Image (cartoon, grey):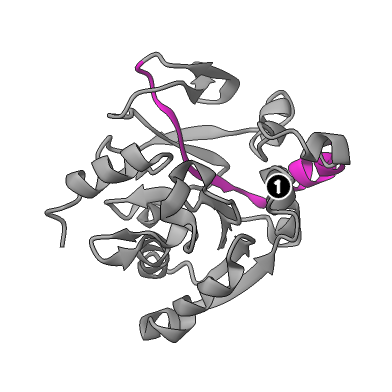
Amino acid sequence: MNAIIMAAGLGSRFKEMTKNRPKSLLEINGTPNLVRTLRMLHDANINDIYIVVGYLHEQFEILQNQYPDLKELNLHFLYNDHFSDYNNVYSFACASKYFGDSFVIDADTVLRDNVFLYHPQKSTYYTILRTIHGAEWCPLTDSNGEVVKMSVTDDHVPSMSGISYWDKVTAQTILKALPKFSQTSQLLEKKGYWDDIPVALLNQISVTTHQVKDTSMYEMDTQENYRTIQKLLKEQV
C-alpha cells in the first residue's frame, strides 16, 4: 500500500499567503499541514509516499531537512512541470505508474483524526458530512453500498473528502482510461480533475464509501477556510 499526495497547485486563492510558500506547507498549530498528514500516514504504517510537487517545489526539501522523524518514510518527489497551466489530471499522470493499492490525497486536506488507520479492502471514497457548507461532489450509492453516481450539490449530504483509496484491479481500469483524459485541450480546462476519470467509469468499476466523523478533517480551500480551521483545531495538541 502506498499514498499519492497532490501538492503541485499554485494555491492562487490564498493570494499573498502562498506567494512564498506552497499551500500544503502552511502551518496548522505551528506544523506544516503536509507534515501532519505524513506523520499520520507513518502511524498507519503507510510509508511509501509519492508527492507530486510543482509550485515552489524546492521548498519541499524541508520535509527531509527539518523533520528528522520523516526520514523513516520512503518519500518520492515527482515534479509536475505544467503546474501553472494544466489541471490536476496531469499531476495524477505524473504519479500514474505508482497508482494501485493507493491512497490518493489532496494536499489541502487538513486532518484532525488519523483516518488512515482504517484500511479499506476495496476502492473507497472517504466521505464526510461537512460542517463548512458549499457545493461538493457527493457519491450516491445503491442498496449494496456501491457508488452509482456523483452528484454536485450543496445539499447537506456526505461528500468526497479529498481522500480516496484504489485497489489494484480498479486502478488498472482507471489507468487504461487515462490517455482519453490527457489530451492537451482537456488538460488546459481549469475545472478538470483527476476524479473525473473514475466518475466517468462508475458503470465499469466497483467503488464504495467510508464516512468519517464530521470533525475528522477539513479542506483549506480559501483564506477564510484556513482561518476557520485554525480556530477549530486551536486546542489540539
Q: Where residue 105 appears, x then y in whole percent? A: 52, 51
Residue 72 located left or right of residue 122: left
Examine the rendered structure and indicate whether residue 158 appears above or below residue 88. Answer: above
Tell me which residue sits at (47%, 67%) in the image.
Answer: 46
* Total marks placed: 1
Q: Residue furthest front?
A: 16
Q: Is residue 200 magenta?
A: no
* Residue 214, image x, y percentages: 28, 34
- Quadrant location, the N terminus: bottom right
Residue under pointer 1: 171
Is residue 42 or residue 84 the one in the foreground? Answer: 84
In the foreground, 22 or 118: 22
Nearer the observer, 215 or 125? 215
Q: Residue at x 49, y 72 (%)?
A: 47
Tell me, yes or no, whether the highlighted magenta stretch contains residue 168: yes
Question: How far across and how far down the image is residue 32, in percent?
Answer: 36, 65
**Would you say residue 183 is visible in this rendering?**
no
Q: Label 1: how many residues lie within 10 Å, few (<14), some (14-19) or many (20+)?
A: many
Kind of residue at badge 1:
Ala
Side of 37 relative to 163 (left or right): left
- The quadrant of the image that shows the C terminus is bottom left
Which stretch appears magenta?
Answer: 156-180
Please provide percent x and percent y for residue 18: 46, 55
Q: Is residue 194 visible in the rendered structure shown here?
A: yes
Residue at 37%, 82% in the rendered image = 69
The residue positioned 44% from the left and 52% from the top of the image is 16
Nearest to the observer: residue 189 or residue 194: 189
Local SS, label 1: helix
